[in-house]
């Protein structure tokens, strides 16, 4: 049996970054999916491989962006460099009038296939090299959607390797799935608690995405490292194109 589906893209997506990526003339203002930037991303830093990651959730993107902040004890927010300020890109998403068929993987929740996909790409992959064709029998999809791994996946992968676990061993893969769905305090999270991401692979998909503007963190309104509560929009000043 085959499922016939129609994949409808959201109109607005968000991406967390820092101001230097906006100020750089060869950065996001030049093109949204930028493989020169991706070459600087360590291969084990992304759940679905080295690509451009977006979300429909502004709060989630704001938390991504705030990871760029250093602690107040180390530098003091008053002297925080402009180029290091957290920024959330607002991206308009629309199908172009003409495009070739594209491969989409849409994980609508946690599953063995979802965690196996993350394990493969966190374990060993790079911008132009992953094992999808050998493990799954197909090239890497151009768009991948699905839940975020909740735990510090880099540390989980390091432990996976230290314990000499194997990707092809089913019990080791199940161990990995359990670990990446735990919060830092050990609680298990599922479903929407994990957060959601939509990742883009290949600059040919730039025809789908347009940078509308960006939200820059206003340090005078800064509420804290983690975006919580209902007033998080008040922290950000919007700059439209």
Image: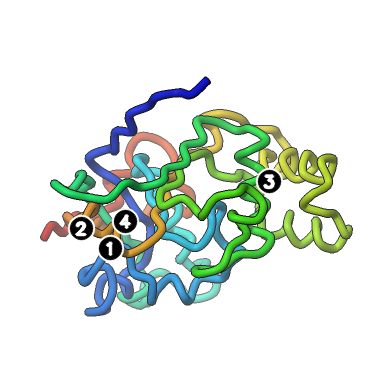
Residue drawn at x 46%, y 65% as measured from the top left:
69
On screen, residue 4 versus residue 75, left or right, reads left
Where is mark 1, residue-wise?
Answer: 32
Say what secondary structure mark 1 lies in. Answer: loop
- Residue at 77% x, 44% y is 173
| Quadrant location, the C terminus | bottom left
Q: Measure the alpha-carbon separation of dots 4 and 2.
A: 11 Å
Real-space Cα separation, disc 4 to disc 1, in angstroms: 13 Å
Q: Which residue occupies the extreme front position in the image?
A: 1
Residue 62 versus residue 234: which sits nearer the camera?
62
The residue positioned farthest toward the left in the image shown: 241
Above or below, comparing residue 14 to residue 85 in the picture = above
**For residue 191, above or below residue 42:** above
Q: Are marks 3 and 4 in contact (CB under 8 Å)?
A: no
> Counting residues from the N terminus, which is met first, the one under dot 4 or under dot 1?
1
Answer few, some or many: residues within 10 Å of disc 2's Cα (few below 14, many 20 plus, some between 14 and 19).
Answer: many
Q: Looking at the image, is mark 4 or mark 2 earlier in the sequence?
A: 4
The residue where tag 4 is placed is: 88
Of labels 4 and 1, the one closer to you: 1
**Callout 2 secondary element:** strand
Q: CA distance from mark 2 to mark 1?
A: 7 Å
Q: Residue 220 occupies which quadrant of the picture?
A: bottom left
| Mark 1 surroundings: few (<14), some (14-19) or many (≥20) residues within 10 A | many
- The reply to whether discs 1 and 3 touch (Cβ–Cβ < 8 Å) is no
The residue wearing badge 2 is: 211
* In the image, residue 47 above or below residue 8: below
Task: Answer whether labels 2 and 1 touch (C-beta < 8 Å).
Answer: yes
Q: Secondary structure at mark 4?
A: strand
In the picture of the structure, the residue carrying the numbered disc 3 is 184
Q: Of callouts 3 and 4, which one flags the residue occurring earlier in the amino acid sequence?
A: 4
Considering the numbered disc 3 on the image, is that residue within a helix, a strand or a loop?
loop
């Amino acid at each position: 049996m085959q499922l016939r589906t129609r994949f409808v893209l959201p109109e607005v997506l968000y991406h967390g970054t820092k101001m230097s990526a906006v100020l750089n003339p060869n950065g996001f203002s030049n093109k949204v999916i930028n493989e020169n930037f991706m070459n600087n991303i360590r291969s084990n830093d992304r759940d679905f491989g080295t690509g451009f990651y977006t979300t429909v959730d502004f709060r989630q993107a704001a938390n991504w962006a705030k990871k760029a902040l250093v602690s107040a004890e180390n530098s003091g927010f008053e002297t925080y460099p402009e180029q290091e300020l957290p920024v959330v890109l607002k991206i308009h998403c629309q199908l172009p009038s003409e495009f070739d068929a594209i491969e989409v993987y849409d994980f609508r929740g946690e599953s063995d296939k979802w965690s196996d996909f993350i394990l493969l790409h966190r374990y060993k992959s790079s911008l132009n090299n992953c094992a999808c064709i050998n493990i799954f029998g197909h090239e890497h999809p151009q768009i991948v959607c699905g839940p975020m791994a909740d735990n510090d996946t880099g540390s989980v992968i390091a432990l996976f390797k230290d314990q000499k676990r194997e990707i092809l061993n089913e019990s080791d893969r199940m161990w990995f799935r359990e670990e990446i769905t735990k919060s830092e305090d050990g609680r298990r999270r599922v479903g929407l608690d994990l957060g959601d991401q939509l990742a883009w692979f290949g600059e040919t998909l730039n025809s789908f995405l347009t940078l509308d503007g960006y939200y820059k963190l206003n340090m005078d309104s800064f509420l804290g490292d983690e975006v919580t509560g209902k007033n998080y929009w008040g922290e950000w000043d919007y700059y439209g194109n």
